[in-house]
Structures are given as C-alpha cells and as structure tokens.
Image (tube, rainbow, N blue to C red):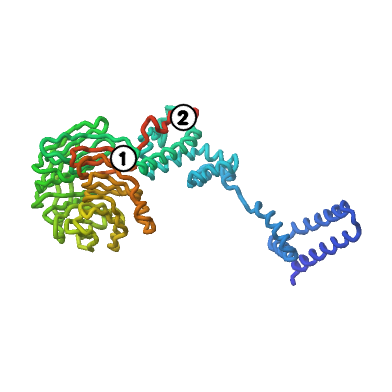
C-alpha cells in the first residue's frame, strides 16, 4: 500500500473514531454539530490537497461503507449537478444562434413544452421567431401546408419580406399555428364527409360531346374533347380562353408543362403545341391506330396505342423528338402508360400490366390478376394502382409483381384512377367518383367495408378523366362537363386571418 492509500485509509478510520468519540462525550446536539464541523473543516482541507485520483479513491471507499438507501440519497444530490441547461448557457457564451438552431428541430408539441422550461428558453424561441420558422418548414415540405398558405394568404408573412413594411412579431406566428392546424383538420373532415363546393364548366361541344382528358394548375384547366379540339379554361371565371384545332379525331390524351402541350388523338397522331400562343409546333406520325395515352418527363416521352404497341421517344426540344424504341408484347390495345427513371408500366385490354426497364426498354415482368381489360393505372415508387372493366381497382407491388389489395365498389368499368400519399380517387362508367383511404387499403388488417371514404355523384355520364390535389378534384365526363370539387372550407365559414402586425391574427 502506497503512502496516499495509507493516508486515505487512516483518514476514514480517524473520521469514524472521532465521530464515535464525540457521540460518547456528549449528547448535546449543538455540541456534536460543532465538533463535527471542526472535523469536517479539517478533512475538507486535507481533501483539497489531494489530486483528483486520490479524491476519487477516497470517495469510492467512503461510498463502499454506506447503505443502499444512502446511495439513493446521494444520487439525488448528484443528478442536478450533472445536468447542464445548455440552451440557457449558449446565449451567455455568445452562441445564441446555436441554441436557436437546436430548438428548430422540435415539432409543435415539443416547442410548446420548451416554451415552459424557463424564461431563457422562451426568450430563445420568441427572439428566434421559431414558430415562424416551423410554419415555413411545413410549407416547404408539405403540399397541403403550401397550398393552404397561398389560398389563405398567410404566405405573404413568410420567408423573405419587404423590410420597409411592418411585419408580424413572434406572437402572431405563435397564435397562427393552431389556427392552421384547425384549418387542416377541417379540410380532412371535408374529404371524409364529402362536404364540398361544386363548380361546373359546360363545354358546349359542337357535334360529338364528351371531355376525354384534362390537366390543371392554379390558373388554367386544359382539356381534350371528343369534338377534336383542345380547350383551355381560365380558373378565375371558368371561361374558355383558347381553343386549339388541328386534330382530325377525338383528343384522347394530353399532358402539358410550362412550355408545351402534347396531345394524342384517335387520328393516330401525336401533336406538340406552344402553350402560350396555341401554335402547333410538330406532328408525330408513328402509330397506325388511335393514340390512347402518353406521358413525358425529363427529355423522354412514352406513347401507347390501340395498335397494341408502346413507343419510347427522346425529346431534345419541342420540335426535336425522335423515336428510340418500340415495345411490343401486349395482345390488345395498350390503354395507359406511366414511367419513372426505373420502370415503364403499361396496361392493356389483354388484362395484363407489363413492366419494362426505362434505361434499356427490356421487359421485366407481367402483373396478372384483373379478370377483364385494364383501362387506367398510376405508378409511383413501388406502388401501381390500376382500374379495370372488371369493375375493380387493384394495388400492386411492382418489385414483386404481387397484388396487395382489391377494391370493389364501382358498378361499371373503372376508367380513371389517381393516388397521392393519402388517398386513391377513382372515376367509372357508372358516373361515380370514389375516394379511398390509401393507408387502410395497404393494411391487410383493414376491413373491406372501411376503405371507401366517400362516393361523389354529380356527373350524368361516364367519368373519363380526373386529377386531384390536397384541396380539390377536377373531373371530366361523357356528359360534356368539367366539374371542380373544392374541399377547402368556404370563405364564410373559414378561418381567415386579418393581420395586425403589432398584435395577433384575428378570425
């Protein structure tokens, strides 16, 4: 045993002896405390002279002589000593933005709790405008929040603002957040209950009536009609702002981006149009029968036809489009195609879905299950959702080729289908539009009767095409109408924000 260990052992023994002697000498509590304080002072001085290792060794031996109950009491003393309120300490060290950055990772519930921790935490949250930043984060990452910001107008108080104008303080955003949550709940409830505002466009086609296809954005709806025309509708007043003529057959499919509209027709051609001026830029003649569907993205286009083939095109520019490959294998008309960077997916009247590699157009697999021809599908990530003339909708895992779920409810051919992260929306020849719960449909434990959230009935003819987002469905029909189903709470019932930049949002 070295000198330090001997001193430590002797010190403990001396402490025990001294305490015993003091207890024996007097029963007076005051005298005992006085003597103990003198000995404590002596031991403190000796303890402070030791190095850290010796101090730790002494405490370790002291702890070994104590009871479990004493250990528990000591642990309660140590716990607050070991804790550090770094959020409060960082600003004092000149690292205010570090504390602010850490708290930006909190969700709304945690941020509410953090405000109550201390005045220092509340100050970091308020001066850092963390509620504003949380709202901005949601707007950047969630399409529902983004759409709501623009529709309700509070986008004007987010992100970079005109510094010459007054702007809301922290309290405004703190109080705005729960109002947004209530608004979102209202929208979700409207989807489930079917509560909506309906707007109708009567296309007034000459001769043959029916709207076969459409696509929309915030400003316009572009539709392909049975009367051989493409009509562009203004979203504000629902009037026709432009009519494109050139096809000699019904316009069966179309897609547009910021510069062009590309359409396919029963005249067997694909035509490219300048979206701003409506001028026809190019006509592609390849298919020998009606072009039933097309998709384009990132310099590539895929078309399919009643001639049973699929054509893959390279798009260098709107006027420089060249055939890359023709895919054959279906035994009937190819009614629909979709693709991403990994797969091209096609569906046919032959009851099958075929999967092809996008990179080299090589065949991968066939998905079998539908009892009759397939009229529509959408493909995204690993999920394919298809609709058929067997009146059913099927969900497929594209990697394994397995059918995950069959949805039943339509009375006639399912002509159009779309899905997002929450819902599947389908339209059929029975004139009905059905809204389905996607998460429940993917859960094998969900009863079949719970999957359809709502059936919407307004069209008086077959539903040919639909598209939807977080707030609305836009559908077209053989009845020559385009319907806009708006699930956003109408203005007279809405949570509306009248901004007082020096106070709080009012509703």
**Badge 1: few (under 14), some or many (20 or more) residues near its Cα, within 10 Å?**
some
Q: Position of residue 102 (x, y in %)?
A: 51, 47
**Element class at badge 1:** strand
Which quadrant of the figure contains the C terminus? Answer: top left
Front residue of this view, candidates 3 and 379: 379
**Residue at the disc numbered 2:** 506
**Residue at the disc numbered 1:** 472
Q: Please say if the residues under marks 1 and 2 sit with CB atoms less than 8 Å apart.
A: no
Q: Position of residue 308 (x, y in %)?
A: 13, 56
Of the numbered discs 1 and 2, the one sitting upstream in the chain is 1
Front residue of this view, candidates 229 and 360: 229
Q: Position of residue 230 (x, y in %)?
A: 16, 39
Residue ID at (10%, 40%): 246
Front residue of this view, candidates 309 and 494: 494
Tell me if residue 258 can be seen: no
Residue ID at (37%, 38%): 148
Within the image, what quadrant is residue 193 found in? top left
**Element class at badge 2:** loop
Q: Residue furthest bottom?
A: 1
Q: Residue furthest right?
A: 25
Residue ID at (38%, 32%): 153
């Amino acid at each position: 045993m070295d000198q330090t260990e001997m001193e430590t052992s002797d010190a403990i023994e001396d402490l025990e002896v001294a305490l015993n002697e003091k207890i024996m000498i007097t029963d007076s509590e005051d005298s005992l405390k006085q003597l103990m304080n003198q000995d404590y002072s002596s031991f403190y001085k000796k303890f402070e002279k030791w190095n850290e290792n010796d101090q730790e060794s002494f405490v370790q031996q002291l702890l070994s002589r104590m009871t479990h109950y004493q250990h528990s009491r000591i642990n309660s003393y140590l716990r607050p000593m070991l804790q550090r309120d770094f959020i409060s300490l960082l600003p004092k060290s000149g690292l205010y933005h570090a504390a602010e950055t850490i708290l930006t990772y909190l969700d709304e519930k945690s941020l509410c709790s953090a405000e109550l921790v201390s005045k220092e935490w509340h100050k970091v949250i308020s001066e850092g405008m963390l509620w504003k930043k949380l709202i901005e984060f949601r707007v950047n990452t969630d399409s529902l929040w983004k759409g709501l910001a623009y529709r309700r107008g509070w986008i004007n108080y987010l992100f970079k603002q005109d510094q010459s104008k007054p702007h809301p303080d922290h309290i405004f955003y703190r109080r705005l957040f729960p109002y947004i949550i209530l608004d979102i709940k209202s929208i979700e409830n409207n989807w489930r209950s079917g509560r909506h505002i309906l707007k109708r466009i009567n296309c007034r086609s000459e001769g043959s009536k029916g709207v076969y296809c459409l696509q929309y954005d915030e400003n316009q709806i572009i539709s392909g009609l049975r009367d051989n025309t493409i009509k562009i509708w203004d979203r504000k007043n629902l009037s026709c702002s432009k009519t494109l003529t050139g096809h000699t057959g019904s316009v069966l499919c179309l897609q547009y981006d910021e510069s062009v509209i590309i359409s396919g027709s029963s005249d067997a051609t694909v035509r490219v149009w300048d979206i701003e001026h409506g001028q026809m830029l190019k006509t592609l003649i390849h298919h020998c029968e009606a072009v039933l569907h097309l998709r384009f993205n990132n310099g590539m286009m895929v078309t399919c036809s009643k001639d049973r083939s699929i054509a893959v095109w390279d798009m260098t520019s709107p006027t420089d489009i060249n055939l890359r490959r023709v895919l054959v294998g279906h035994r009937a008309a190819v009614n629909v195609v979709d693709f991403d960077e990994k797969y091209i997916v096609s569906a046919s009247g032959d009851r099958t879905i075929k999967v092809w590699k996008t990179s080299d157009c090589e065949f991968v697999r066939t998905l079998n299950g539908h009892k009759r021809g397939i009229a529509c599908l959408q493909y995204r990530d690993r999920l394919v959702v298809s609709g058929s003339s067997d009146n059913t909708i099927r969900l497929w895992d594209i990697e394994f080729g397995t059918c995950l779920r069959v949805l039943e409810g339509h009375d006639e051919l399912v002509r159009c289908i779309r899905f997002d992260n929450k819902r599947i929306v389908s339209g059929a020849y029975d004139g009905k539009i059905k809204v389905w719960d996607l998460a429940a449909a993917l859960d094998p434990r969900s009863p079949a009767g719970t999957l359809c959230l709502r059936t919407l009935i307004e069209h008086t003819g077959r539903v040919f095409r639909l598209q939807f987002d977080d707030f609305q469905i836009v559908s077209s029909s053989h009845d020559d109408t385009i319907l806009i189903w708006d699930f956003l709470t109408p203005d007279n019932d809405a949570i509306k924000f009248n901004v007082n930049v020096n106070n709080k949002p009012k509703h």
